[in-house]
Image (spheres, rainbow, N blue to C red):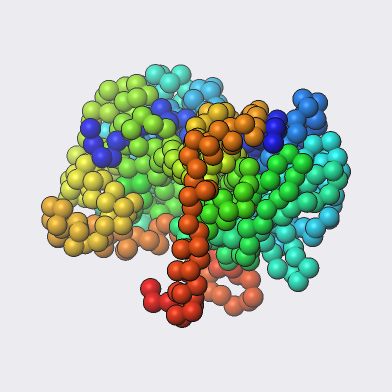
């Protein structure tokens, strides 16, 4: 038993209600979601299938020519297990149209372009499907800024945003999602052999334990070190969180008038709904 | 006091007075049909909770529009409901009104506005400064609006006012999904807190929470009635909207107060003396933190 453990039943009940309620306020009862073959998108669509019925969830696979073929196979296994409809849109031509002309070799830039191509596809298909774009970013990656701004982080509704990766795995197991999705090493699959944990330089389990104490329980650096966390690790994670705050907020607006959007013009999206 | 109650655990629409009034009317009509004496709604039941800049837009003067309709309904059933009050001097309050026989007979302005974490009530509303007693034909009541129940002054004053029941309307967010098998952490905390107040004040406690979501923040339900021994006598489980039927009577109050003579043995004068000394020594606002 981990201190990160949540009650799966309770969490799923809340998240299913959240999806129905928030989509329903805007007249939607269906969603569309990028299906990468990873655990996050699998859990997101698993929750959506419970909330709206599998027939109202569209999973979109969007491989690039270098994507690992097993990702698509895993995505299909998830869709099959849940009984949701799928669509495949190869983004190679779309991405290469820009990447080739611009001669971009930098791995990060290429990955960001791919992520943003996928966002364009999802938002476009959402009109045809008549559903909201469902997010798949979990709390660990949101805090670490481990995502592409306006790319994979873009969505209308995100059921995973307050769940650490550990907890996403818990829900995946509880939802009985295919084991190949749960057992494989998490990867953004933006280049060959990429894994999240290699790229981050630490394990999800390790960082989730730290984030729980640092963020949710507000432990100080000294307290974290006294509890056994390595000082350099604590500093690295803290600096990543602060450095990526910009990804978590809307663009900065310069205040000029008496009531400025995002400063002192304050309404929820649920305004009147 | 012998009182048949309905506690309405509803899902108000944020800032939509018309929709929320319609919901109140429908709930009241059902209560009348069922011969209910007292119908209780949650905090800000007529407006929704995270109002922010909508606060002044939905504020109501006493007797205005929807409140006149509630007053009208109260000819057939006593009603308590939450709204944003626009006071005569223009200040806005998180108010909980109590209507009976067509009149507003009590109004509590939330004293302890929550302004921390996800809450920013004091940014938009002023704080009340008293815990008045409501004299109803169904009993004597004190209102503790949500955070008011997390401070000792309100329950303590209610204890000394000899009320029969604490009415605790709230808009409490659902939080805490830890794997301890005991349900939502927020609902557990409320149950512990209010059971304790029921025991210590030897009164009935009616907790009326809401459900639904406002921009991702869910409200946790857990509406319940607790007897003067601290035991839940009726509760709504889960996160659905619904109405809880319950009964409160004087017999339980009498039994509790005989079994444990807390009132007889209270030494409120010690508290009064100590507080007076502290007030004289420098007041409250300027005290060293």
Could you tell me residue B241's position as x and y percent? 62, 32
Could you tell me residue A177's position as x and y percent? 34, 23
Residue at point 45%, 74% (across, down): B278
Work out which quarter of the rendered image holds the C terminus of chain B and state it. bottom left
Image quarter of residue B12: top right
How many labels sit on residues? 0
Work out which quarter of the rendered image holds the N terminus of chain B and state it. top right
Residue at point 28%, 40% (across, down): A4
Could you tell me residue B234's position as x and y percent? 57, 28
Viewer-nearest residue: A17 or A136: A17
Image quarter of residue A259: bottom right
Residue at point 34%, 60% (across, down): A244
Viewer-nearest residue: A37 or A267: A267
Viewer-nearest residue: A103 or A250: A250
B180 vs A52, left or right, is left
Could you tell me residue A65's position as x and y percent? 32, 37
Rendered view: A258 above or below B43 = below
Residue A167 visible (yes or no): yes
Residue at point 38%, 61% (across, down): A245
Rendered view: A148 above or below A256 = above
Viewer-nearest residue: B36 or A158: B36
Residue A97 visible (yes or no): no
């Amino acid at each position: 038993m981990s201190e990160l453990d949540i009650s799966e039943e309770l969490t799923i009940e809340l998240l299913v209600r959240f999806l129905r309620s928030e989509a329903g306020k805007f007249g939607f009862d269906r969603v569309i979601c990028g299906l990468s073959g990873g655990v996050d998108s699998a859990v997101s669509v698993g929750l959506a299938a419970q909330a709206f019925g599998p027939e109202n969830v569209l999973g979109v696979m969007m491989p690039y020519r270098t994507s690992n073929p097993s990702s698509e196979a895993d995505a299909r296994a998830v869709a099959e297990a849940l009984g949701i409809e799928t669509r495949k849109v190869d983004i190679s031509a779309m991405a290469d149209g820009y990447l080739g002309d611009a001669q971009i070799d930098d791995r990060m830039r290429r990955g960001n372009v791919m992520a943003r191509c996928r966002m364009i596809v999802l938002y476009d298909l959402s009109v045809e499907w008549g559903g909201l774009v469902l997010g798949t970013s979990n709390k660990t990656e949101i805090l670490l800024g481990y995502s592409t701004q306006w790319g994979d982080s873009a969505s209308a509704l995100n059921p995973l945003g307050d769940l650490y990766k550990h907890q996403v795995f818990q829900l995946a197991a509880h939802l009985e999602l295919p084991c190949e999705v749960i057992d494989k090493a998490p990867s953004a699959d933006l280049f060959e052999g990429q894994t999240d944990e290699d790229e981050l330089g630490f394990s999800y389990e390790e960082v989730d334990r730290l984030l729980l104490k640092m963020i949710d329980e507000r432990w100080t650096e000294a307290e974290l070190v006294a509890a056994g966390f390595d000082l350099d690790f604590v500093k690295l994670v803290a600096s990543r969180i602060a450095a990526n705050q910009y990804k978590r907020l809307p663009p900065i607006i310069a205040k000029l008038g008496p009531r400025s959007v995002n400063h002192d013009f304050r309404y929820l999206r649920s305004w009147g709904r | 006091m012998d009182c048949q109650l309905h506690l309405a655990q509803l899902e108000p629409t944020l800032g939509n007075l018309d929709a929320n009034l319609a919901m109140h009317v429908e709930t009241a009509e059902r209560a009348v049909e069922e011969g209910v004496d007292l119908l209780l709604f949650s905090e800000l039941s007529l407006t929704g909770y995270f109002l922010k800049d909508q606060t002044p837009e939905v504020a109501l003067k006493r007797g205005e529009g929807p409140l006149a309709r509630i007053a009208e309904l109260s000819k057939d059933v006593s009603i308590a409901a939450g709204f944003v009050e626009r006071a005569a001097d223009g200040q806005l309050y998180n108010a909980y009104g109590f209507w009976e026989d067509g009149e507003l007979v009590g109004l509590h302005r939330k004293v302890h506005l929550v302004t921390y974490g996800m809450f920013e009530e004091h940014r938009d509303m002023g704080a009340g400064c008293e815990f008045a007693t409501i004299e109803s034909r169904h009993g004597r009541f004190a209102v503790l609006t949500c955070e008011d129940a997390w401070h000792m002054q309100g329950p303590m004053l209610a204890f000394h006012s000899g009320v029969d029941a604490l009415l605790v309307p709230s808009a409490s967010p659902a939080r805490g999904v830890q794997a301890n098998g005991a349900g939502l952490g927020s609902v557990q905390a409320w149950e512990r807190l209010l059971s304790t107040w029921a025991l210590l004040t030897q009164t009935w406690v009616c907790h009326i929470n809401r459900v639904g979501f406002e921009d991702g923040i869910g409200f946790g339900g857990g509406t319940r009635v607790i007897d003067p021994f601290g035991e839940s006598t009726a509760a709504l489980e889960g996160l659905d909207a619904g109405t809880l039927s319950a009964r409160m009577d004087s017999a339980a109050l009498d039994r509790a107060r005989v079994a444990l003579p807390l009132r007889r043995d209270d030494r409120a004068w010690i508290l009064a003396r100590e507080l007076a000394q502290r007030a004289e020594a420098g007041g409250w606002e300027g005290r060293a933190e």
